[in-house]
Image (tube, grey):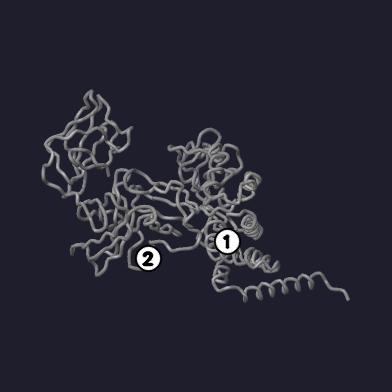
Amino acid sequence: MKWSKHIVSGLVAIFFAMAISVSCRRLPPEISKVLDASRNRKELIAAIDHFRKEGAKEELKACYYLISHLQNHATIDIVLSDTLGHTLCRRDAGYLQALREKSTSLIGKYEAYFPVKVIKYDVDSLGASSIIKNISMAYSVRRQFPWAKKLSDEVFMNYVLPHRIGNEQSEDWRSFFLNRYQSTLLNLPDSATSMDVYRLLNEDLNSWFGYDKNYKPVIPSLSVGQCAELKIGGCEEVANLHALALRAVGIPAAIEIAPFWGKSDFGHAEIVLLAPNGKLAPPDPDRFRGIAAKVFRKTYAVSPSAADSMRLLGEIPENIPPLFAITNLLDVTSDRTSVSDVSVELNAAFTNCRVAYICVYNNGEWTPIEWSGLKNGQYATFHDMGCDILYHIAFVSGGELILYGNPFVLKGVNNLDVMNGTKISFPVANVEKFGPNEWNRVVAGREYLLSIWDIDNKRWRPLTKKRCSQNGELQFKDIFSSRLYKLDDVSAPGTGRPFSFRRAKQIWW
């Protein structure tokens, strides 16, 4: 009996739909929820069915885990486009270099192009073959190397299995690193630790990719291939590269960030890897100690942003700083430095506010680093704040930060040193630096401005200008204790860090 090609095609389509339908009915509810919201359903089901047919129970469990947390992950790219929407080919040799040289307009052959952000969500774009290869290679390494064989499922799935570390382009980074390191690692003794492997990889990675403090990100996350092309990056690019290399060879690794330092400007990203005690830690365990107000670990598993919780309390979006919109962050501050809760009672003027913030002084301004809902409209508690850090309580109204009370230093558990002194404790004080680093020393012949924090108007109030003498120090009179000061080079305003005086010596915050 002959079958027409239309009938055959129709039957194939029916059987395929039935197969998908049967497959979906057997799926865990959290997976079905992701599939129902995805435009990439066919590829995700194909990855699941691959491991089902092979009877690979561990890999299937891993596949479920990856898919269940896909929705918060994406490639965020910057493409060059002209005013007509024409995009420059990404593989052009000068693409990344052009983006580095100018962020809004480009020179030479790129002058007609400008950067455009493009977001491609994994849940709608990740192919079955990519998912299958990532899982298969991760489990192959787990069964091959002695340090990986000992890992619990929880640690393996969270810190080895994920297919990405940030918002980098999707690529086969596991093969890149395995081809580079596998033969060397197979010769290591079974007693080799994660730190042994880290040191070996670190030496090689640093030979072809370096840290540059002046690096400005050209795209949110560099892929391994882009790292190889650019050869330099900031702390986040360095940390991401190291984490991917370690995961590729079965060493659990993640990225931890201090979004804003507590005692210097900007922030930091640091790699953490599995330590002998079974927890993740930086190679230098004291990296954040005494200088970080908050430390967060980036996780693959989905977790809501702080902004989601704030909106439930009735906070309007325009009043929520960008930091708190970031998802998939785990607070690990108590693992990295001494901490204490900070509790404050507010006066009646702020009882209509939904949320309060605690700020650090960073890059010349007070910047929110943690938030608290208000209990009974009057009490706020900020949990696990880093000690020995300068803070200020604030609110946001109409998108503007409103400072509340006085700045204070969190000295320890329930021990606040409020910076509101009005008593002259030092008739004379010598000042040698405008910042905590050695390169912040005052220079003979230059003019400097000393300012004091005005506790009433909540701003810096200029006190006096002085030109530095030949001995490399400045002398000021009638200095308050428990009060904030700042020294700026007149030729480069805004470079000074806050400090107070103790025994007539500068104490940096």
The residue located at (16%, 37%) in the rendering is 463
Q: From what the image shows, is residue 25 above or below residue 288?
A: below
What distance separates the C-alpha of mark 1 from that of mark 2?
26 Å
Q: Which structural element holds mark 2?
A: helix
Mark 2 neighbour density, 10 Å: few (under 14) some (14–19) many (20 or more):
few
Using residue 34 as the reference point, say whether residue 390 is left or right of it: left
Q: Amino acid at mark 2?
A: Ser
496 or 107: nearer the viewer: 496
Q: Which quadrant holds the C terminus?
A: top left
Q: Amino acid at mark 1?
A: Asp
Q: Is residue 62 rendered to the left or right of residue 490?
A: right
* 268 over 53 or under it: above or below: above
Q: Looking at this view, is 215 or 120 the one in front? A: 215
**Crowding at mark 1 (Cα within 10 Å: few <14, some 14-19, many 20+):** some
The disc label shown at residue 124, or none: 1
Instruction: Compare marks 1 and 2 and give the one earlier in the sequence.
Output: 1
